[in-house]
Amino acid sequence: MTENETASTTHFIKAIIEEDLAANKNDGKVATRFPPEPNGYLHIGHAKSICLNFGIAQTYNGTCNLRFDDTNPTKEDVEYVDAIMEDVHWLGFDWQDRLYYASDYFERLYEFAVELINAGKAYVDDQTADQIRENRGTLTEAGVDSPFRNRSAEENLDLFKRMRAGEFADGSRVLRAKIDMAHPNLIMRDPTLYRIRKTSHHRTGDAWCIYPMYDFTHCLSDSLEGITHSLCTLEFENNRPLYDWVLDNVTPPCHPQQIEFARLNLTFTVLSKRKLIQLVEEGYVSAWDDPRMPTICGLRRRGYTPESIRNFCDRIGLAKRDSVVDVALLEYSIREDLNKRAPRVMGVLNPLKVVIENYPEGQVDELEAVNNPEDPSAGVRKVPFSREIYIERDDFMENPPKKFFRLGPGREVRLRYAFFVTCTDVIKDETSGEIVELRCTYDPATRGGDAPDGRKVKATLHWVSAAHAVEAEVRLYDRLFNKPNPDEKEEGKTFKDFMNPGALEIRTGCKLEPCLADVGPGYFCQFERLGYFCVDSKDSAPGALVFNRTVTLRDAWAKLQKKG
């Protein structure tokens, strides 16, 4: 599926909602929710759901709740709760006073389970998890009824109360819905509703030792909150009959409508929470907020803006079937955003010293530089120029090939905002033979970067005055994987075998313009000719600047669009 095809189905959920509003369904109300499980950090795929749910509420003057589906205490943590709230706020959305937890409803959920038991629609099963799995059947074979399926309501209710009281060991009993062990949808073959788990919960402590399953909790939580449209990704499509069955067989306040949309799949990326946890716990990345990670906190630390992520989610639209989005579109979105508002500065990441021999010693010229050519209101700044400067080592070759137009012996180039210079000599280390310094001359008549006699040069180089340079560490981030689909199975390999060894390159001793001396965490800018960068929010400190590369200047998405 192409991006244009994806965008063409953007409004299918809106079409459903508008039809409901026209029919005055739900009394003309629209209520959505974003329901993360607090067992990990949010990633770019969650951003799509956040933008959808909160965006729908904004469009139709409705409400959107933030609800934590915290029904698995063995994997949940307050750290994740706090991080999720921070991410949602950072993206620009606010749940106001509508912050909920599934654990808020544990007593009500228990009562709904009792209602099913009394109606003969749920039973306590003594089988082990392996036995239940084995007896569920296959796509072509019906399941086998549990030997405990026909217990009386009274016996089931007594056992369920004793489960709650903590009389039984973990895994010894579960509560199951009594539906149909021959149902063509395996999920409907007497699914588990409650299990025993003697683990302290991050909010309810030790008040409970039985916990409801996600499929039982989710639909009822939606109903208790008055949700009208329960928007979820396609992997829950097969769960929709169970969503409806639970609501149809108890007495809930309302019956929300579940609508599925395609989840986000991104090239050169994994978005499985299980795999992201592996990357963190096994040390492949430094933390959840490592700038190589597709987590929202990782993207934020790398320098992505909330506007760029919202624009990206708007561009990819909504589809009814799965597709894969090129990560180049995400990179295009941040590049487009920063191009409009990021100030331009000069930074040299691999410095080579240049001495301009005919420039007066001790003299400093203040040259005028444009802060952002896309934004005239950004104005100009003064950049100091002196006898000794730094240029990029890659901008010089002692024996340049024919198509190398930058600096070389006897060659003249333009220094950005400054002067024309010509290389006259190359100084090398006597032991290693490495080039350590260049000697050049400059033409004072070319101040500002143009020659009055009209002569042209083929290259313009960025530079930094040696006497005024601010030193920094610069981290060059790239895509975490070198295979477009790292999830694609290859014999004897896992997704971790496709990690990009060049995803992080650390440069120390980089030389930056003096205007960057006092910038703080989160500051972003464009290093001319090199890319967009931001000050690291964790490791940077006054006097010890650390910049992260957000994205390069090369625009792979624009090139793809032109070819298309």
Image (cartoon, rainbow, N blue to C red):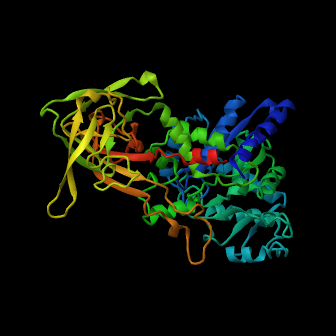
Going 33% across and 51% down the picture, which residue do you hit? Answer: 394
Viewer-nearest residue: 476 or 454: 454
From the viewer's perspective, is 212 left or right of 153? left
Residue 220, percent from left and from top: 73, 48
- Residue 453 appears anywhere in the view: yes
Viewer-nearest residue: 53 or 556: 556
Viewer-nearest residue: 478 or 168: 478
Viewer-nearest residue: 522 or 491: 491
> Which of the 4 image quarters holds residue 98?
top right
Q: How many marks?
A: 0
Going 77% across and 55% down the picture, which residue do you hit? Answer: 237
Q: Is residue 243 above or below residue 303?
A: below
- Residue 88 appears anywhere in the view: no
From the viewer's perspective, is 31 left or right of 25? left
Residue 352, percent from left and from top: 25, 49
From the viewer's perspective, is 547 left or right of 295? left
Q: Is residue 127 above or below residue 333?
A: below
Residue positioned most to the left: 361
Going 56% across and 41% down the picture, which residue do you hit? Answer: 309
Residue 470, percent from left and from top: 25, 40
Going 39% across and 39% down the picture, which residue do you hit? Answer: 528
Residue 494, percent from left and from top: 55, 71
